[in-house]
Amino acid sequence: MPTVLITPEPLRNQPGTFREVFAEAGFRCIDFQGEAVPREASLCALLPEVDAIVAGSESISSSVLDSAPRLRVIARTGVGYDAVDIAAASRRKVPVVVTPGTNQESVAEQTFALLLALTRRIVKNDQIIHGGGWDRTLVQPIRGKTMGLLGLGRIGRAVASRANAFGMRVVAFDPISGDNAFDAQYGIERLDLDAVLSRSDVVSLHLPLLPATRGLVDTRFLAQMREGSYLINTARGGLVVEADLAASLVSGHLAGAGLDVLCVEPADPSNPLLTAPNVVLSPHMGGIDTKSMADMAELAARCIVRLYQGSWPEGCVVNQELAQGWCW
């Protein structure tokens, strides 16, 4: 009987369609017990007996893979895979699966939750009222403002449609993704990066974390943003040089930042953003509401089962080069 390790905290010991998918295919589920984000040592202790893993945000390094001689597939709940050593997985002929089309709506909602929390002073006013105060300082509208999207894949498009509904103009930079019909439907103007930064009242990050994008949001980037503008990051913490962002907030150049992700998670107490003004934080949960988590888990399970049964899940495998001749 093949075994699958379930590591994402919201899925552990919880019912769901994904368990039915595994049960029908003859899999035995092992639920990780321990820290919220499994440490490498904890994974290494379990993986020798595991054939597949439904993974969250934990690091799956080459050394972790060395401890998993039976491992045939890694299925990530989400679309990011920077926590997995893809090259090491490919050398071991382990397909790495993601779950596209399952969480973009959740991330888009989180993007606007963070933006509105900033512009409408939701957190500040709540704290003032709980402290006995009553501050009716005028807030900022988002209607009529320009949202600049860096990345216009599934998530970026989900944000764009909502921005349109809020009466915002949308400009975007994406050197890869292109959809002329979608752009025309929502009046999106494609620009180069510098032009997006200079024209946007809100810059929202929806890029993958790659060597070329790591540290993209640095002093130079921030200086190009409009004075009094906002930065929203629901992508990856590593896109941002956090000390540079904190300095821009302290100087008043940026009006605020809404961050669902940080470079080190959970937050390091020394992170300068924790004491910077007008920052709203959430614990990397933009893509995991109850519906998206269930959908991601189900698609991850179906991909694992398809591979087990000899079928390649097109559109979901990162290291597509393994498709030719791969077998369980």
Image (cartoon, rainbow, N blue to C red):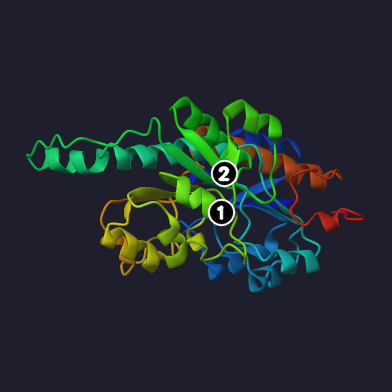
Q: Say which of 56 and 118 sits in front.
A: 118
Q: Is residue 26 left or right of residue 326?
A: left
Secondary structure of the residue carrying tag 2 is strand
Q: Say which of 193 and 211 sits in front.
A: 193
- CA distance separating discs 1 and 2: 8 Å
Identify the residue under disc 2: 172
Residue 33 visible? The answer is yes
The quarter of the picture where the C terminus appears is bottom right
Up-down relation of residue 78 to residue 220 (above or below): above
Up-down relation of residue 211 to residue 74 (above or below): below
- Find residue 257 and report its horizontal and vertical position in percent: 36, 51
- Find residue 171 and report its horizontal and vertical position in percent: 54, 41
Q: Is residue 248 left or right of residue 182?
A: left
Q: Say which of 293 and 131 sits in front.
A: 131
Identify the residue under disc 1: 193
Q: Residue lying farthest right?
A: 325
| Type of amino acid at the residue the image marks with label 2 | Ala
